[in-house]
Image: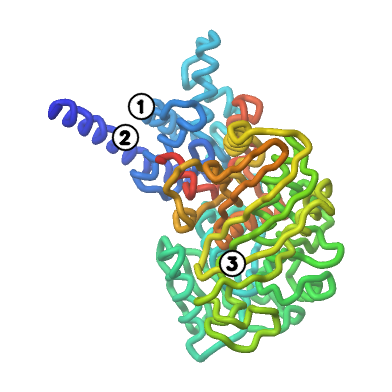
Amino acid sequence: MQHDGTENHDTWLEREALAEAMIPLIGQLYRRNNVVTSIHGRSLINKSTMNILKAHRFARRITTEELRLEDTAPLLRLLADLDLGAAAIDLGRLRLAYDRSAAGGDSRSLEQFVRTELAGIVGQGGRDERTSTDVVLYGFGRIGRLVARLLIEKAGGGHGLRLRAVVVRRGSDNDLAKRASLLRRDSVHGSFEGTIQVDETANTITANGIRIQVIYSDDPASIDYTAYGISDALVVDNTGRWRDVDGLSQHLRSTGVAKVLLTAPGKGDLKNIVHGINHAAIGKEDRIITAASCTTNAITPVLKAINDRFGVVHGHVETVHSFTNDQNLIDNFHRGDRRGRSAALNMVLTETGAATAVAKALPELAGKLTGSSIRVPTPDVSIAILNLTLEHATTKEEVNTYLREMSLHSDMRKQVDYIDSPEVVSTDFVGSRRAGIVDGLATIADGTYLVLYVWYDNEFGYSCQVVRVMEEMAAVHPPSYPAADMVPGADTGDDASDLPGAAAVTADA
């Protein structure tokens, strides 16, 4: 027994060494060639040895077998030698495509196979055809700071979305230092990964080399962004102060602004976009759109999956939602019903427009859903309970199998995750980069009656959805490999923001 244990530990150490050797190659590809590497959608950029090992283990959810580092390490070395142009490359799917090709009688070597599949970017020396888009965050609250973290994380060689400025109202004499401190430390999401510097004279915050201009203003229509070298900017309004065309159009009157994205449900005829559902509706002519709400983003992909397969006759959505900043810590006046009562001490019954808002992204469910919400004394992570009547009868096993497959092999796999661990609780989903995570063990199915429980990080998961919408508006997706038709379930574009969140819990459960 002791010999077996020592042998297993030696194997583990060898795997650790392989993973450690991959880190500089991953960094080289990212910084020199603008190549984002991942394993079945789990980004490898700036990851630790342990996270690389966990990404390899996650592969067994796709192929039933853990991905061997002995297979990916030489593939990664080969990519580094090919001097590639900008791309998103999924090592897990590329290796799987090669293995299946070889099993089918293809006699090409790994290098020959890869050179053929990546012919369009071999020898391009980091060339990136994408144009860069300047981004301005109007407001720097919970969502604003998380979006900032994501944009800094994805900055790479400077192409794509470029965070240039933050607009806030001055709150104190040492406002800049306080803003930087809130970006550096977060009670829920932990410390910022990297370094932050403050220049009081220039009113800038520099995070991991990204210089962010802090602009003080309370008038979205009067800022000259070009004075800061910013042009044709995408302004992300995360204040929630204006939600209709008239209010948000104020941003377009500022010099240097091209488009506006609202991180809240919009009113009137504004397009409410849930990425993975209706992002194809974003047109070049659209200057103002919204990213809907966190709850709408969490439930719409799951509802679409269920409606496509079983049909939804009607349903009720009940969200058990963490408290938010608009509630009172202790009892005090609030213009909203019940929200004046202490958020830290009470469950607070309130309204939600998420059920109705689903129809803006998924018109086939118009008039079929009702909804309500209970705010509870937790700072982050919520759960939506979908109580549905279906057109076609089903079973718990059938529904769970279907939703698990959707989370792995569909074009909504960036939005939908699945877990069946009997021990998970809300804090396990802090940092999840999926819009919603189906808790399979909680599923109830009885003929045409179905109840689903969907967890979601209402801050971070939603912020990831916001960034995906931003990328669509700016058209800054790099070419993706392997091609979508090479591997069953392959994506049309890898998502560099999809790091292990709840999926890491699922993978090791």
Q: Is residue 418 above or below residue 81?
A: below
Residue type indicated by callout 3: Ile
Of tags 1 and 3, the one toward the viewer is: 3
Disc 2 vs disc 3: which is toward the camera? 3
Residue 366, relative to residue 137: is it above or below?
A: above
Q: Earlier in the sequence, mark 1 or mark 3?
A: 1
State the CA–CA distance, disc 2 to disc 3.
37 Å
Q: Kindly check if marks 2 and 1 are in contact, taking CB atoms under 8 A apart as contact.
A: yes
Helix, strand or loop status at disc 2: helix
- Of pointers 2 and 3, the one earlier in the residue sequence: 2
Which residue position holds label 2?
Answer: 18
C-alpha separation, residue under disc 1 versus residue under disc 3: 40 Å
Q: Could you say where residue 55 lies in the image, as x and y percent from the top left?
A: 43, 39
Question: Which residue, as the protein is rendered here, is positioned at the far top?
Answer: 105
How far apart are the two marked residues, 2 and 1, measured between alpha carbons?
8 Å
Residue 368 vertical placement versus 309 (above, below): below
Mark 1: which amino acid?
Answer: Glu
Which residue in the structure is indicated by mark 3? Answer: 143
Mark 1 in CB contact with mark 3 (< 8 angstroms): no
Please provide percent x and percent y for residue 25. Answer: 40, 40
Left or right of residue 322: residue 209:
left
Q: Mark 1 sits on what residue? A: 70
- Please tell me in which quadrant of the rendered image residue 412 appears: top right
Q: Quadrant of the N terminus?
A: top left
Q: Position of residue 281 (x, y in %)?
A: 80, 49
Query: Which label's residue is closer to the chain start, 2 or 1?
Result: 2
Q: Is residue 144 visible?
A: no
Q: Residue at coordinates 77% horizontally, 46% vertically from top-left? A: 280
